[in-house]
Image (spheres, grey):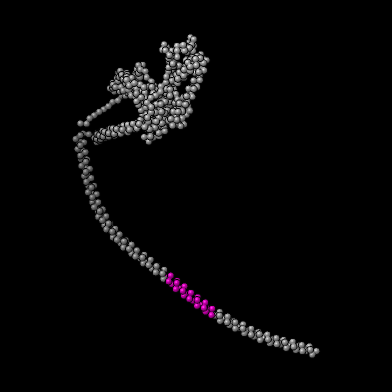
C-alpha cells in the first residue's frame, strides 16, 4: 500500500516535473517563435522599403524616358508643321504671282479681242467690196463675151481638163520611161547572173532512127518471105520500116520517139539473134517495151532527183522520162527542162520569190511534149490538163500553159519560166539549127505575112513561134483584122513546115502625136 502511494506520488511528482519542464520548454519555444516572427517582420519591412524604393526609381526612369520621347515627337511635329507652313507660304506666293500674271494676260486678251473685232469689221467690209467688184467684173465679162455663166464655166473646165490631161500624159510617159529603163537594167543583171551561175553542157543527145545491117542477106531476112517479117514488125511496134538500096542501113520512121526507140532496139536485138520470124518479133518487142518502161521511169526519177524536187506524182515521172527521147531543133527536151528548172530557181531567188516552186514549174513546163503526138492541141494546154489531174498548184499550171505567151500570166513564176526557157533555147550550142536556116525561116514568116493586103509591117518573134503583124488602121477595121489573122495562119500552114504552133497576132492602133513649139 505504501509502495503504491509512493508510486502514485512519484508519478504525480514526475508528471509535475515533466509539466514544468514542458512549460519551460514551451515558453522558450514561444519566445523563440516570437523573436523569429519579429525578425521576419523586420526583414519583410526592410524588403518592402527596398522594393518600394526600386519601384519608385523605375517609375521615375520610365517617366523621364517617356518625357524625352514625347519631347522628341513634339519637336518633330513642330519641325514638320514649320516646314509645311513654309511650303504653304511659298505656294501662296506662287499663286499670287500667277494671279497677277493671269490678270495681265486677261487684259492683253481683252485688248486683242478688241483689235480682232475691229479687224473682222474691216475684213468684212473688204470682202463685201471685193464681192461687189467680182460681180461687176463678171457682169462686164459676160457682156463682152456674150456667154452665159454655165457656158463660161464649161469652157473653163474644158481648158483645165485639157491641161491636166496633158500634164498627166507627160508625167505618165516620164514615169513609164524611167520604169522601163530600171526594169531593163535589173532584168539584164538577173538574166546575166542566172546564166553565169548555171553552167550546163552545150552538147545534147539526139535519138537515132537507123539500124546497121551486116549484109544484104540479113536485110532479106528482115523483110521475110513476101514481106511477112517486116509487116509483123511494123504491126507490133507501130513504126514504118524503110528498106531501100542504101547498103547496111535500115531506117525506122515514127512520129513517137519512144515507139521509134523501142523499134530500133528490137530490130537490133533481132539482127543480133538471127532468129527472125513473127513469133520472135512479138516476143522481143514485148520484152523491149517492158524494158523501155523501166528505162523511162529511171530517167524520170533521175531528172526529179537532179532537180531536187519532192512530191512528184508517179504518173508524171515516166512522162519526164519520155522527154529524154524527144528533141526540139536538136535540143534534148529533158535536158532543156532541167536547165529551165535551175535557171528559174536562180532568177526567183534573185527576186526574193520561192526558188523551189520556180524550179518545179521550170522542170514541168514542157511536160505536154511527151504526149502532144497523141492528143489534140498544143503542148502547153496538154501539159496543163495533164498536171491538173495530179493536184499541181495554180502557179505551176499557169507557167506550163502560158510559158509561150498563149494565155495571160497570173503569177510572177510564169514570166520567170518564160525568161528561163528563152535563155536555155538561145544559148550557144543548145539547138542544132543553123543560123542561116533559122534566119531564112524567120524571113519566110515575115514575107508571108506582109504579102496579105492591108499589112504594113510583120515581125517574127520568140524564135519563130509568133508573128506580130501591124496593119494600117485607116484601111483595116477590127473585123478585117480578124480575117487577116486567119488568112496569114492559113498561108503559113500551107507554105511552111514547123514544129508545134505559130501564133499570129494582128495589131491595129491609132496614134495621135502633137508637138509643143
Quadrant holding the C terminus: top left
- Position in image of residue 488 (x %, y %): 34, 19
Left or right: where does residue 8 sit relative to residue 155?
Answer: right
Residue 366 visible somewhere in the drawing? no
Tell whether position 324 is magenta: no
Say which of 380 and 169 sits in front.
380
Left or right: where does residue 127 sit relative to residue 364?
Answer: left
Residue at position x 52%, y 17% from top?
A: 283
Magenta region, mostly helix, strand or loop? helix
Say which of 510 and 505 sits in front.
505
Residue 58 visible somewhere in the drawing? yes
Q: Residue furthest bottom?
A: 2
Q: Please say if 68 is above or below 196.
A: below
- Position in image of residue 169 (x %, y %): 27, 33
- Residue 508: image quadrant is top left
Residue at position x 21%, y 36% from top?
A: 142
Q: How many marks?
A: 0
Q: Residues in magenta?
A: 46-70
Left or right: where does residue 482 sit relative to residue 282?
Answer: left
Residue at position x 33%, y 33% from top?
A: 189
Q: Please say if 378 is above or below 190.
A: above
Amino acid at each position: 500500500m505504501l509502495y503504491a502511494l509512493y508510486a502514485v506520488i512519484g508519478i504525480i511528482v514526475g508528471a509535475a516535473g515533466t509539466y514544468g519542464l514542458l512549460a519551460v520548454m514551451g515558453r522558450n519555444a514561444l519566445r523563440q517563435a516570437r523573436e523569429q516572427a519579429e525578425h521576419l517582420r523586420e526583414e519583410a519591412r526592410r524588403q518592402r522599403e527596398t522594393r518600394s524604393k526600386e519601384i519608385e526609381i523605375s517609375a521615375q526612369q520610365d517617366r523621364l524616358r517617356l518625357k524625352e520621347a514625347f519631347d522628341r515627337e513634339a519637336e518633330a511635329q513642330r519641325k514638320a508643321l514649320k516646314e509645311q507652313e513654309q511650303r504653304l507660304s511659298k505656294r501662296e506666293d506662287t499663286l499670287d504671282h500667277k494671279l497677277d500674271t493671269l490678270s495681265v494676260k486677261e487684259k492683253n486678251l481683252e485688248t486683242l479681242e478688241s483689235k480682232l473685232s475691229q479687224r473682222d469689221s474691216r475684213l468684212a467690209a473688204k470682202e463685201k467690196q471685193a464681192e461687189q467688184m467680182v460681180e461687176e467684173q463678171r457682169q462686164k465679162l459676160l457682156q463682152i463675151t456674150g456667154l452665159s455663166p454655165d457656158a463660161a464655166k464649161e469652157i473653163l473646165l474644158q481648158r483645165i481638163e485639157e491641161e491636166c490631161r496633158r500634164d498627166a500624159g507627160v508625167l505618165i510617159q516620164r514615169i513609164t520611161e524611167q520604169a522601163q529603163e530600171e526594169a531593163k537594167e535589173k532584168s539584164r543583171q538577173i538574166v546575166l547572173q542566172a546564166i553565169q551561175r548555171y553552167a550546163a553542157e552545150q552538147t545534147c543527145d539526139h535519138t537515132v532512127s537507123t539500124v546497121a545491117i551486116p549484109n544484104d542477106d540479113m536485110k532479106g531476112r528482115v523483110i521475110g518471105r513476101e514481106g511477112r517479117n517486116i509487116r509483123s514488125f511494123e504491126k507490133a511496134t507501130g513504126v514504118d520500116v524503110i528498106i531501100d538500096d542504101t547498103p547496111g542501113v535500115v531506117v525506122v520512121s515514127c512520129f513517137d520517139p519512144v515507139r521509134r526507140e523501142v523499134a530500133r532496139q528490137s530490130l537490133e536485138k533481132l539482127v543480133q539473134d538471127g532468129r527472125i520470124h513473127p513469133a520472135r518479133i512479138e516476143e522481143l518487142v514485148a520484152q523491149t517495151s517492158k524494158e523501155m518502161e523501166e528505162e523511162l521511169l529511171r530517167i524520170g526519177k533521175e531528172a526529179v532527183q537532179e532537180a531536187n524536187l519532192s512530191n512528184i506524182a508517179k504518173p508524171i515521172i515516166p512522162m519526164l522520162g519520155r522527154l529524154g527521147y524527144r528533141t526540139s531543133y536538136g535540143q534534148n527536151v529533158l535536158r532543156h527542162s532541167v536547165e529551165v528548172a535551175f535557171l528559174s530557181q536562180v532568177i526567183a531567188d534573185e527576186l526574193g520569190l520561192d526558188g523551189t516552186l520556180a524550179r518545179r514549174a521550170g522542170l514541168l513546163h514542157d511536160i505536154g511534149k511527151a504526149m502532144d503526138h497523141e492528143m489534140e492541141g498544143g503542148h502547153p494546154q496538154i501539159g496543163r490538163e495533164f498536171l491538173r489531174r495530179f493536184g499541181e498548184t495554180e502557179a505551176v499550171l499557169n507557167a506550163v500553159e502560158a510559158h509561150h505567151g498563149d494565155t495571160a500570166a497570173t503569177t510572177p513564176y510564169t514570166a520567170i519560166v518564160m525568161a528561163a526557157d528563152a535563155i536555155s533555147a538561145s544559148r550557144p550550142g543548145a539547138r542544132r539549127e543553123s543560123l542561116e536556116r533559122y534566119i531564112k525561116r524567120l524571113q519566110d514568116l515575115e514575107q508571108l505575112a506582109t504579102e496579105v493586103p492591108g499589112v504594113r509591117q510583120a515581125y517574127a518573134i520568140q524564135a519563130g513561134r509568133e508573128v506580130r503583124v501591124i496593119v494600117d488602121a485607116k484601111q483595116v477595121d477590127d473585123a478585117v483584122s480578124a480575117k487577116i489573122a486567119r488568112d496569114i495562119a492559113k498561108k503559113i500552114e500551107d507554105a511552111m513546115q514547123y514544129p508545134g504552133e505559130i501564133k499570129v497576132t494582128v495589131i491595129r492602133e491609132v496614134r495621135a502625136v502633137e508637138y509643143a513649139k
